[in-house]
Amino acid sequence: MIKLSGIRKSFGRHEVLQGIDLTVNKGEVVAILGPSGSGKTTLLRCINYLEKPSDGEIRIGDFSLDVRHAGKKDIYALRQRSAMVFQQYNLFSHKTALENVIEGLIVVKKVGKEEARKRGIELLEKVGLGAKLDAYPSQLSGGQQQRVGIARALALEPEVILFDEPTSALDPELVGEVLAVIRRIAKEGITMIIVTHEMGFAQDVANHVVFMDGGVIVEEGDPAELFGNPKEERTKQFLKRFT
Ligand code: ADP
């Protein structure tokens, strides 16, 4: 359902992604692990063209884009199919929680205001924020802001949600509530790709784990296999740090 083929990305002379091939099946939860600087965030950002890959092909569902020939319409079509949850939440500070969630519904999906409001409220209730509809981001904790970010991504009904280290900006006591929400939506069969440093969470929630280092996928597979019996030396060294 999602297929990345030969994805490359350079910043100046530094090739940060050196030909990434990855297939993700519908409903799969993929955790991307790896040391800092290995290219995880860049890969995620390439999938919805927040970074323009230097080369490769991206397929999401029935839509496929070859970066060498991609025009504006292709990029728009790609972005219709994925939604990103950012490390720093990236909410509009002058909009309430509900307005943040329904903005994309109204602007991108052209849903009417009343219908958008109804869906926005349902989604905020789903992430445990039914009592905070009219709160502004500055009135919410980091964990609550991130849950608004997740509701906003869900609102777009994308084929895949991309999570970029969703808990790394949070105080430790707020990490659990956000992971609990992600865990819950994972069970609903939404396809997700999550860059994370939360090893326990990855082991628990993911059904496909990818280990990246130096701009390549070093090893990938079933979590029990990858965590329990890593094959590559680099994977072993990386996982050792967490045991
Ligand atoms: P990770 O998510 O695994 O920590 P990143 O994808 O953030 O890794 O970064 C991979 C490499 O690309 C790093 O060396 C980083 O410094 C570099 N990089 C990322 N974004 C940019 C950018 N906008 N300009 C230049 N270099 C960048």
Image (cartoon, rainbow, N blue to C red):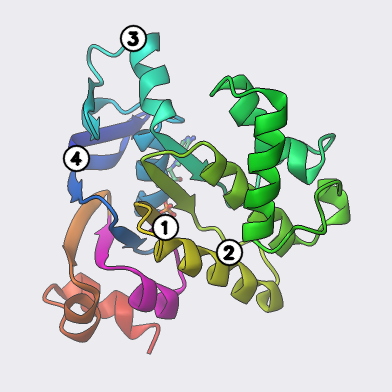
Which one is nearer the viewer's eye here, 60 or 42?
60
- Locate the N terminus and report the quarter of the image it occupies: top left
- First along the sequence among labels 4 and 1: 4
Name the side, left or right, on which 117 lies relative to 23.
Answer: right
**What element does badge 3 sit on?**
loop
For the residues bearing labels 4 and 1, Cβ distance under 8 angstroms: no
Give the residues drawn in magenta, as a range: 194-213
- First along the sequence among labels 2 and 4: 4
**Residue identified by numbered label 2:** 167
Residue 53 place in picture, x, y as percent: 31, 28
Q: Choose top left, top right, bottom left or bottom right for residue 7.
A: top left
Task: For ligand 1, give the image quadrant.
Answer: top left
Q: CA distance from mark 3 to mark 1?
A: 28 Å
**Residue identified by numbered label 4:** 3
For the residues bearing labels 3 and 2, Cβ distance under 8 angstroms: no
Q: CA distance from mark 1 to mark 2?
A: 10 Å
**Residue identified by numbered label 1:** 195
**What element does badge 1 sit on?**
strand
Name the side, left or right, on which 111 lies relative to 200.
Answer: right
Return the mark for residue 71. 3
**What element does badge 2 sit on?**
loop
The amino acid marked with disc number 4 is: Lys
Task: Answer whether residue 88 is visible to the viewer in this image.
Answer: no
Q: Is mark 1 within 8 Å of ligand 1?
A: yes
Does 174 appear above or below 42?
Answer: below
Residue 59 place in picture, x, y as percent: 22, 32
Does 235 appear above or below 167?
Answer: below
Estimate how packed mark 1 is, as few (under 14), some (14 to 19) or many (20 or more) residues with alpha carbons within 10 Å.
many
